Amino acid sequence: MYKNSKVAVIIAAAGRGRRLGSNVPKQYLKIGGEYVIAKTIKAFEDIDEIDYIFVVTNEDYTRMCAEIVDERGFSKVEGIVPGGSRRQDSVYNALQEINARKPGVSMVLIHDGARPFIEKNVILNVLEETENTGAAVACVAMKNSVRMMEAGGQASKSVDRTDYYSVQTPQGFRKSMLIDAYDRAYDDDFEGTDDASIVERAGYDIAIVDGDYGNIKITTKEDLPMENRVGTGFDVHQLTEGRKLILGGVDIPYDRGLLGHSDADVLVHAVMDALLGAAALGDIGKHFPDSDDQYKGISSLKLLAQVKKLLEENYYNIGNIDVTLIAQRPKISPYIDEMRDNLSEVLALDRTRINIKGTTTEKLGFTGREEGIACEAVCSIYR
Ligand code: MG
């Protein structure tokens, strides 16, 4: 309840998000582990002045939306309404539902499901001005200079940008005004670009209130905040006679090799553990146990390919990898380029994102005594 008005919010989430180049509509993608739509609903659920929430969603996602609402215990969600073919049809469906289910509502806010970063103060600005004037829209001043096309695109002139605002949501309206405007738009077959344009056409004034530059609508992949993570890996294998020395997938001529269940490629093992660690997917022992015969003598590059697949299944991309191999002998510098090429090929990662370097421990410790070789790796991943 805002002052004396019962307030309903329509969250317009029926879009199919084709512009994002994803099969999943943007409002059903996750940011920081939570669905965009859930973040948007929560912003309104948490505000005392809001009484009811109606979510309009396309029919393929009605069940998923209901589950999301249920799991999070959003108690103000009164209806999940199937969307229409255009945005205005979706909003109209929700308006009918509000009228039927909550006739006492006198103020309606409409908000894009793909604007999850909406702040409380913007919602309250819109409520206050809607209460005062009947129709209010959150807007921000234009930051960029603006030009207008002239002579059919042959010329252009600069215009005073202080006269122009970018429109956001929420857009708030007295319910009677909104229904009148929508009825008239349908009578005249008018299609508006947003709710304010429909209400304006019916002869009502629209007030502008302060929006927020952070209140973006997620439209393209670039709008999704990136989740960056890092991981570390460390591995040691014993040097022994009668084994090949495989490092970074390269068979290095040497009088001894590393002992292990697979090809004992200590470098690739450290890289795999770093990648799995960054994604919180455990370690190589969990995915490729040495009790399992299918991994006996296997090239570790094949296991690395499986780790890459696991990352992909969890939507992660690799940012970079940095590796330090700790060995007294042999010198690895002649083989570094080939190792980088191997990792680059298996991970489909540009070699400028892969660094491999060697160090000794000045003849100290087990690596210094040439009893074994150790390797550590750090990586970054993102999604
Ligand atoms: Mg190992």
Image (cartoon, grey):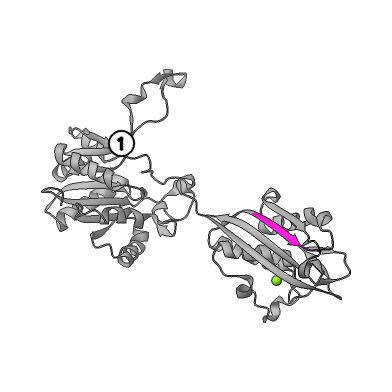
Quarter of image, res 334: bottom right
Residue bearing the label numbered 1: 139
Q: How many residues crowd mark 1 within 10 Å: few (<14), some (14–19), many (20+)?
A: many
The boundaries of the magenta stretch are: 321-327
Nearer-the-camera pick, 261 or 84: 261
Residue at (41%, 59%) from the top-left corner? 34
Image x and y of residue 182, in percent: 21, 42
Can see residue 368? yes
**Residue 1 magenta-highlighted:** no
Is residue 316 found left or right of 54 in the rendered image?
A: right
Image x and y of residue 281, in percent: 55, 67
Is residue 240 found left or right of 150 in the rendered image?
A: right
Q: Main secondary structure of the magenta part?
A: strand
Task: Ligand 1: give its quadrant.
Answer: bottom right
Nearer-the-camera pick, 103 or 296: 296
Secondary element at image label 1: strand
Residue at (57%, 70%) from the top-left corner? 282
Can see residue 183? no
Badge count: 1
Establish if 18 lies above or below 234: above
Establish if 343 lies above or below 290: above
Image x and y of residue 306, in percent: 64, 66
Residue at (63%, 74%) from the top-left corner? 285
Residue at (70%, 81%) from the top-left corner? 293
Nearer-the-camera pick, 233 or 53: 233
Amino acid at circle 1: Cys
Is residue 282 found left or right of 53 in the rendered image?
A: right
